[in-house]
């Protein structure tokens, strides 16, 4: 990839992979190598399909989601070997369904019904409802799981596995202050701190909000003035309590609206849209680097090999086949 032709497409996961390591991006999104699937991803996929199926129908949300879960379940092994393990995991996922419905699912299902009743023609529920945003003449695909209108706002919602990747975005509820500081720390070439997951969520928010504005225009939702992006972690072990005697599982689900963490009020005042100039500019730079290469993590001017080696390599799904890492481990220098 060397020229920005306008036909290029880049999934937002690719942008996030690039933040960790350009070689990881190359393996996953240019060479199309497929790392081992993780068990956690299968659980999230199962929940995502069940909840979207229930939201599509709109009524009896929890019962429909549990029934969908049961139908899909027989085909899912989730790496569980004993009957007791499988029964426990099933209870855990059913508890997540209940917690989601109680936290926001019921209200979101009602908002979806009202949005449809307002005459919207077009799909609003995924999984992976496609959204597209153009940056640097490259189309970034950034799916959500569903979208609904409430008043003059169009909200996109994405289910996540663990909230761990959000870091302080879970608790800092506005851009000014800690969020801006961490972002600057990551993007400052002289800083010795990097926060790829944290920054990845901000870049994803930029892409999703742009995609929602395009969806708003496509669906001719003229009354919609602003867009918002909410993520809902579903597999938060720290929020789960297990009673092994009574064989019950309780859990809670806490949605995180990333919009206010992302928007800077200076840009909002100028554009009247939920945007952040610094984040959008960084997204453009990453997109340009990702489509152009080179992808050598040890020599690329925009990467810090010491950080990649220490933080990205140990949890990288491509570590077993990566020459950069192997050469580094055995001490071969170019
Ligand atoms: S093992 Fe390390 S250098 Fe290789 S792709 Fe993964 S993160 Fe990058």
Image (tube, rainbow, N blue to C red):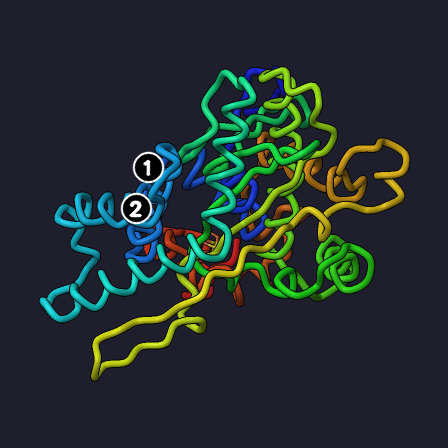
Tell me the crowding category of disc 2: few under 14, some 14 to 19, or many 20 or more residues within 10 angstroms, Cα based.
many
Name the residue carrying label 1: 53
Earlier residue among tags 2 and 1: 1
> Residue at (36%, 45%) from the top-left corner?
61
Q: Position of residue 232 (x, y in %)?
A: 50, 52
**What is the crowding at mark 1: few (fewer than 14 residues within 10 Å), some, or many (at least 20)?**
many
Q: Is residue 209 above or below residue 171?
A: above
The residue at the far bottom in this view is 245
User: Of all residues shown, which one is farthest toward the left?
Assistant: 83
Q: Which structural element holds mark 1?
A: helix
Distance from Cα at disc 2 to Cα at disc 1: 7 Å
> Which residue is nearer to you in this view: 327 or 23?
23
Q: Quadrant of the N terminus?
A: top right
Q: Is residue 95 above or below residue 115?
A: below
As drawn, 58 above or below 122: below
Is residue 192 shown to the viewer in this render? yes
Q: Residue at left 45%, top 38%?
A: 145
Label 2, secondary structure: give it. helix
- Residue at image point 71% right, 59% down: 173
Q: Is residue 183 left or right of residue 146?
A: right
- Disc 1 C-beta below 8 A from ligand 1: no
Residue 304 position within the rendered picture, expressed as x and y whole percent measured from the top left = 64, 57
Q: Disc 2 marks which residue?
A: 65
- The x, y position of residue 161, in whole percent, is 42, 56
Which quadrant of the structure image shows residue 53? Answer: top left
Whether residues under marks 2 and 1 lie with C-beta atoms below 8 angstroms apart, the answer is yes
Q: Where's residue 155, x and y in %? A: 60, 38
Residue 104: mark: none
Q: Let me know if residue 189 appears in the view.
A: no
Q: Residue at x 46, y 52 (%)?
A: 160
């Amino acid at each position: 990839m060397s020229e920005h032709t306008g036909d290029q497409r880049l999934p937002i996961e690719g942008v996030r992979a690039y933040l960790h390591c350009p070689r990881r991006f190359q393996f996953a999104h240019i060479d199309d190598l497929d790392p081992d699937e993780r068990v956690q991803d299968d659980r999230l996929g199962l929940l995502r399909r069940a909840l979207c199926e229930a939201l599509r129908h709109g009524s009896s949300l929890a019962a429909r989601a549990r029934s969908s879960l049961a139908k899909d379940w027989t085909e899912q092994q989730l790496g569980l070997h004993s009957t007791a393990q499988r029964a426990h995991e099933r209870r855990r996922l059913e508890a997540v369904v209940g917690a989601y419905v109680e936290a926001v699912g019921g209200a979101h299902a009602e908002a979806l019904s009202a949005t449809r009743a307002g005459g919207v023609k077009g799909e609003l529920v995924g999984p992976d409802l496609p959204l597209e945003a153009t940056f640097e003449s490259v189309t970034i695909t950034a799916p959500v799981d569903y979208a609904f209108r409430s008043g003059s706002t169009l909200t996109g919602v994405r289910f996540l596995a663990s909230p761990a990747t959000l870091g302080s975005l879970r608790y800092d509820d506005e851009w000014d202050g800690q969020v801006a500081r961490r972002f600057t720390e990551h993007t400052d070439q002289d800083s010795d701190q990097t926060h790829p997951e944290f920054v990845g969520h901000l870049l994803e928010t930029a892409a999703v909000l742009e995609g929602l504005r395009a969806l708003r225009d496509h669906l001719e939702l003229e009354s919609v003035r602003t867009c918002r992006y909410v993520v809902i972690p579903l597999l938060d072990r720290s929020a789960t309590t297990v009673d092994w005697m009574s064989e019950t599982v309780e859990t809670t689900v806490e949605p995180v609206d990333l919009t206010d963490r992302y928007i800077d009020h200076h840009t909002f005042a100028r554009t009247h849209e939920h945007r952040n100039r610094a984040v959008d500019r960084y997204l453009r730079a990453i997109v340009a680097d990702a489509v152009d290469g080179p992808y050598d993590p040890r020599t690329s001017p925009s990467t810090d090999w010491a950080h990649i080696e220490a933080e990205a390599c140990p949890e990288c799904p491509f570590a077993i086949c990566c020459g950069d890492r192997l050469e580094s481990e055995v001490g071969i220098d170019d």
